[in-house]
Amino acid sequence: MTILYQTKMCESDKDEVDQIRSKDRATNWDIASFIISIISHIVDVFFDCNLAYRYYKMPNSGGYFLATLAFILIPAIINTAFSLRMYVLDHENKNKSTTLTKRFTKRRICCIIVLLFQLAPILRYFDALLYAIKSKEAEKNKDVENQRKYYDLMVKEDSDVALLRVLECFLEAAPQQILQLSIIFYNRGKDIGSDVFTLVHQLLSIGSSFVSMAWSMASYQRLLRVSLRNKHNISWAATIVQFMWHFLVTVSRILCISVLASIYPVFAVLGLLGHWFVMTIWLSCTSANNNFCDHNRLYDFLFYSIFGAVYIFTHVVLVEGPTCFKYLIFYVILFSENTVANILWILYGDSDMKKKDYYIPIIYLNVIPFIFGIFFMVLYYKVLHPSTGCNRQQDVDNS
């Protein structure tokens, strides 16, 4: 099972084992990106679990503890289910290679460990990292056949984990940020969350989630290019610009949802449900002819529904093709919803809220990061996209 269930990875040509293009080689950048992904995921999970523990130990905060724990475990269950589904499909496709993921999914106790500690993406990252190192070693030994073999396995594992990472970030990290920001805004310095120590833990959890989400989207976009051999890879500069694009747009989006949830939680939930429904229908219509889950209608429905929830926060490219018009519609919808939330924050925030030092800065942070995020998106597609201008002939080789 490969990324987005749509990635068309060509099989290695038997008569071309004596030559490998630079884009089809594992690079130091690949190894570094796997290490960064592993660290960012572990840090994000640690801060979320730490915050849940803080709520558990604090008096009169059982509701916050349960909500924080729910936003940790429910996405972990979904992610583990997707990972197990990938394992089943790999087995059906006669992929017998032994990986950490397969070793852990063979026993129930290991599955429980994977679930509780959100290890599904971590296992696949370690598998991809191992394949990247083996491919580099084969390249040094001039073993072209194994070099290509391990590179293909690396891309396959990277494909699987990219999907899991996006799901984890936007089903766990994003709702977690909204919850914690809403708690901060709602309490406005009163009782729970009022002390500086608790606030620091809340901000650490929020900050780590923001970085983790942006990095997951940047690495996801990079993998889209790597997995298609007729496409050029993405450079370091382009990856950094993509990171800024997704980071800034996500900051604005989550802040807007959080401020609305802090004053009108019911309206916020209804608005998110409406957005989720529209996005699910949109995905069902625009992707109806694509084979995501082996033409299994139940899995297709679950797939569209889950990514409909992801589309509350960001646009994810699921299939190859033109994206300009889709981006235009999606970001217009996001900006309109963000603007409504910001206006409600300005008009209906209570007097205590308006006295806080963060009240005015939040108004600007609801808008300015989104504008800059769109600027970075345009910069990427106009200047740094691998198929534009001087980048057209470049194959990235950081070895």
Image: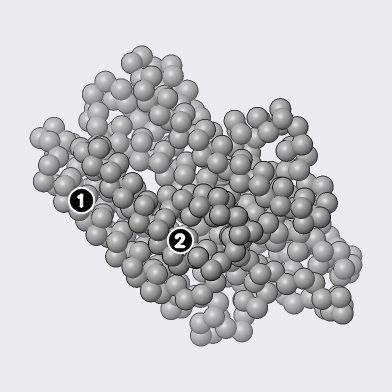
**Looking at the image, which residue sits at the far front?**
297
State which tag comes first along the sequence, 2 or 1: 2
Q: With respect to residue 140, does 49 lie above or below? A: above
Position of 100 with respect to 86 (left or right) is: right
| Residue 98 picture location, percent across and down | 82, 47
- Quadrant of the drawing holding the C terminus: bottom right
Position of 63 with respect to 76 (left or right) is: left
Q: Nearer the viewer, mark 2 or mark 1?
A: 2
Helix, strand or loop for disc 1: helix
Q: Residue at x 71, y 47 (%)?
A: 87
| Residue 204 picture location, percent across and down | 43, 37
> For the residue carrying disc 2, how many other residues have a C-alpha within 10 Å: few (<14), some (14-19), or many (20+)?
some
Residue located beneath label 2 in the image: 284
| Residue 259 picture location, percent across and down | 25, 42
> For the residue carrying disc 1, how many other residues have a C-alpha within 10 Å: few (<14), some (14-19), or many (20+)?
many
| Residue 311 picture location, percent across and down | 41, 55
Q: How is the image coloured?
A: one colour
- Residue 130 visible in the displayed image: no
- Residue 349 visible in the displayed image: yes
The mark found on residue 174 in the picture is none
Q: Residue at x 34, y 70 (%)?
A: 328
Position of 155 with respect to 244 (left or right) is: right
Residue located beneath label 1 in the image: 342
Disc 2 and disc 1: Cα gap in Å? 30 Å
| Residue nearest the observer in this picture, 242 or 61 | 61
